[in-house]
Image (spheres, helix red, strand yellow):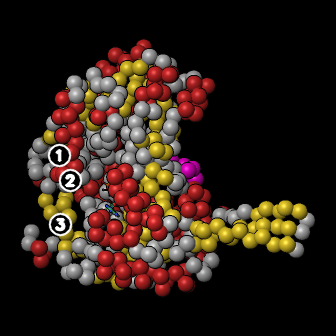
Amino acid sequence: MGECTMKKIKNYINGRFQAAISGKYLDNYNPAEGKVYSLIPDSDARDIEVAVEAAKDAFADWSETTAIERSLILSKIADLIDRDHEMLAKAESVDNGKPLKLASRVDIPRASSNMRFYASAIQQFASEFHQMDKSTINYTLRQPVGVAGCISPWNLPLYLFTWKIAPALAAGNTVVAKPSEITPMTAYLFSKICVEAGLPPGILNIVHGLGSKAGQSIVEHPEVPIISFTGGTETGKKLAVTAAPMFKKLSLELGGKNPNILFDDCDFELALNTTIHSSFANQGEICLCGSRIFVQKGIYHKFLDAFVEKTRLLKVGDPLEEGSKLGAIVSEDHMNKILSYIQLAKEEGGTVIVGGKRVTVDGRCKEGYFVEPTIIIGLDHMCRINQEEIFGPVVTIMPFEDEDEALEYANSTAYGLSATLWTEDLKRAHLVADQIKSGVIWVNCWLVRDLRTPFGGMKQSGMGREGGLEALRFFTEPKNVCVKL
Ligand code: NAD
């Protein structure tokens, strides 16, 4: 396809669709085919400047609207996402490489739930009142902060993009948002939906481009006092360094290396089947995937055999085909990173007992970036494979003796995003959950999400919490008013 016939994604600034001021474009790949299929505006500080100006101008009116007025628009956007469900799911699958079925069942429904949830939550949001004595009262105003910067990653593109935008807008902020340059398509389609839903110009501005240029310019901009970021820990550190001297409000949702702990007394079949999902769903490219599986000695061999057998049955293939359980890895670079970690596992003394290689899928996907679901055993919990985030379809399995050992292994990394426990003993579940240093713990389930709950990580997995009222608190500035009557 020549450049002139290729679909060009546009920035959405001040209600208008436009190219980057530089006039330059970046390639956007279909990872299942290994081919460029559209072009992205290569935006820089100049585009961000225009977007921030528009958002600043729009703030005066938007921050004065009632919660109900904002709620109506967010609900309308949710309805339009539902109407376009099929088209958006296909776009997400093509752009990211994930199975269409997954995009259709998880990503797109969650995007509309995010909008609908915050449309409702903002109407329930209350602030605090403290009475000191009969004649002294305090009430706390919660005011929108201003222009919010929202920056999201490629693994759950529209799902995580809307998870930030919805609470930011609901709370009365205006937004300059940047989706990942690796998966920009559904954010572009979303901008068209916002226009159709009647969102007035300037309230949401979506600027496409590289993190180092467009993203960095948002974080550096002095008129953007609040940043919500989801992405890698190293990028999060850079953001924090830029934002700290300006005392910006920061929410950082970063990487993970999550433990999945199976005790002898677990519901074996349930733990086994769910572990297949928590290991390989979305090609293992979910920050919550349980990449370190710890199995108590009494069921270790039984689990290993059953898990190997089930993993061998997983079909890696064309994401648009019904039977494909794993689609393509998001990019060639990321595929090579995953393969290099598998090589490192061997150098560290591990044994690859399933998978370990790139897969060639026949037909239109023959140039695509596919990797086999991979199981590695025989590694120490402190080696690099068990300490660093791989973010692919690669898990390690290790035996453990008792609760203390499981806890020591689980807490041994720099990360602290999520953990999963499998046991029928509620007391044990509670005691272990209490001591694991992760922001999100699942007991006898995985990725069950109630949007009202706080979501986020400890240690190097991030700072702050998203979800429920936590996000509305983050996107508002509390101001206490003390009145002596
Ligand atoms: P990334 O850090 O490379 O990029 C994330 C976003 O930040 C992209 O939009 C990118 O363009 C932008 N960016 C890059 N450099 C920037 C800079 N200097 N200033 C501002 N923006 C910049 O991450 P990724 O590879 O897109 O995503 C994968 C990572 O995201 C993994 O580490 C994964 O664990 C993490 N993640 C975390 C969560 C969570 O909720 N904690 C959820 C999903 C993904």
Badge 2 or badge 3: first in the primary sequence: 3
Occupied quadrant, residue 204? bottom left
Tell me which residue sits at (38%, 47%) in the image: 255
Q: Where residue 469 sits: x, y (%)?
A: 60, 58
What amino acid is found at the position of numbered circle 3 in the picture? Answer: Asp
What amino acid is found at the position of numbered circle 1 in the picture? Answer: Asn
Residue tagged by mark 3? 27
Split into quadrants, the picture shows ligand 1 in the one at bottom left
User: In this image, 70 relative to 412: left or right?
Assistant: right
Tell me which residue sits at (34%, 52%) in the image: 234
Residue tagged by mark 2? 331
Badge 2 or badge 1: first in the primary sequence: 2
Measured in 3D between alpha carbons, the distance from the residue under mark 1 to the one under mark 3, in whole angstroms, is: 19 Å
Badge 1 or badge 3: first in the primary sequence: 3
User: In this image, 174 relative to 238: left or right?
Assistant: right
Of marks 1 and 3, the one in the foreground: 1
Q: What element carries label 2?
A: loop
Task: Indicate whether 256 appears above or below 40.
Answer: above
Q: Where residue 474 sits: x, y (%)?
A: 56, 62
Task: Indicate whether 62 appears above or below 269.
Answer: below
Q: Which of 264 and 230 is in front in this view?
A: 230
Residue tagged by mark 1? 336
What amino acid is found at the position of numbered circle 2 in the picture? Answer: Ser
Magenta segment range? Answer: 448-454
Query: What is the residue that sits farthest to the front in this orientation?
Result: 245
Mark 1 surroundings within 10 Å by alpha-carbon count, few (fewer than 14), some (14 through 19), many (20 or more): some
